[in-house]
Amino acid sequence: TALGPGAVHVPDWLAPEAQLRLLQACREWAGPPAGLRLVRTPGGGVMTARQVCLGWHWYPYGYARTVVDGDGAPVKPMPPWLAELGGRAAEAAGHDVDDPYDIALVNFYDADARMGMHRDSDEKSDAAVVSLSLGDTGVFRFGNTRTRAKPYTDVELRSGDLVVFGGASRLAYHGVPRVLPGTAPPELGLTGRLNITLRVSGFSE
Ligand code: MD3
Ligand code: FE
C-alpha cells in the first residue's frame, strides 16, 4: 500500500517466527555495553523512546562509532543477516539496493513513549529507510517535506509490518504520536513496541 511517493507499507511482512527471532536479537542488543540508553537532545529534553544502535551510533544530531553520549563503548556491529534483511525489504518495496544496509536503530516504546515530528537527515546516503515494527501497535504519523504540521496521515503500524521510505518520502517529517498498549501478539511476550529502522550511512569511515 502506498503511503505517499516512495513510501510503501507492507502489513505482516515478517512471519510470526521471524518476529520472534528479531525480538530475541533486540533483547540481546539491549544489554550492555553499548546497550539501551536514554537519548538527551541538545535543548535539554529526553526522548521517551529508549534506543540501541548497531553499526553506527546515532546521537542528536550525527553518527559516531562509539556511544559518545552514553557509556563510550564501541557500537555493536551490524550483523550481516540484518543487513541482508534490510536489502530484501527495500527490494520488496521496489527500490534498487546499491550499498549495504550498515545502520540499525532500535527504538523501545513503553505505553507512554512518543516520537515527535522530525526528519531523518543525518545519513549521507539517500537510500530508502526500512522500518520494521514489533509488539504493540504504534500510531505512525506520516507528514510532508515542508513542515512538521499538517497535512499528515496517521497509519497504525502493527507487529510484523514493514514500511519503506525512499525517493520523495525520504526527507518527509514523521513521528509516533502514540502507542496502543496491550495490542501486541500474545505469543511474542512483549509489553510495549519496538521499531527497527535499517539505513545506509553513506559514510566511508
Ligand atoms: C520516514 N522511528 O527512528 S519508523 C526514527 O516508529 C523513527 O520508531 C519511528 O522515526 C518509529 O527515526 C518511525 C518509520 C520511519 C522511519 C524512518 C523514516 C519513517 C521515515 C525516514 C524518512 C521518512
Ligand atoms: Fe525518523
Image (spheres, rainbow, N blue to C red):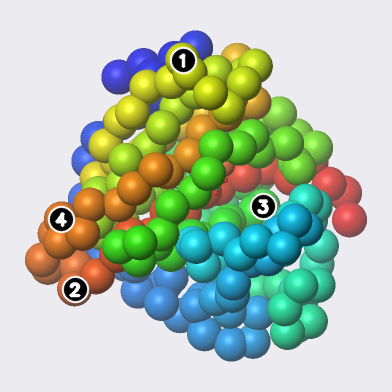
Q: Nearer the viewer, residue 70 or 25?
A: 70
Residue type at mark 4: give it.
Thr
Nearest to the eye among marks 2 and 1: give it. 1
Residue type at mark 1: give it.
Pro
Q: Which mark is residue 102?
A: 3
Regarding mark 1 in the picture, which secondary structure is present there? Answer: loop
Q: Is residue 84 left or right of residue 145?
A: left
Name the residue rendered at 37%, 22% in the picture: 153
Q: Which mark is residue 37?
A: none
Residue type at mark 3: give it.
Asp
Can see residue 132? yes
The spot of residue 70 in percent (x, y) is 72, 78
Regarding mark 3 in the picture, which secondary structure is present there? Answer: loop
Cα–Cα span, label 3 and label 4: 31 Å
Cα–Cα span, label 2 and label 1: 36 Å
Q: Nearer the viewer, residue 177 or 19?
A: 177
Cα–Cα span, label 4 and label 1: 27 Å
Name the residue rendered at 26%, 59% in the picture: 135
Residue type at mark 2: give it.
Gly
Question: Hey, which residue is sitting farthest front in the picture?
Answer: 44
Q: Nearer the viewer, residue 170 or 79?
A: 170
Categorize mark 2 by other alpha carbons within 10 Å: few (<14), some (14-19), many (20+). few
Categorize mark 3 by other alpha carbons within 10 Å: few (<14), some (14-19), many (20+). many
Pointer 4: what residue? 183
The spot of residue 141 in percent (x, y) is 41, 32
Nearest to the eye among marks 3 and 1: give it. 1
Mark 2 and mark 4 lie on one chain; the one further toward the N terminus is 4
Q: Which mark is residue 151?
A: 1
Name the residue rendered at 65%, 61% in the picture: 45
Q: Nearer the viewer, residue 68 or 11?
A: 68
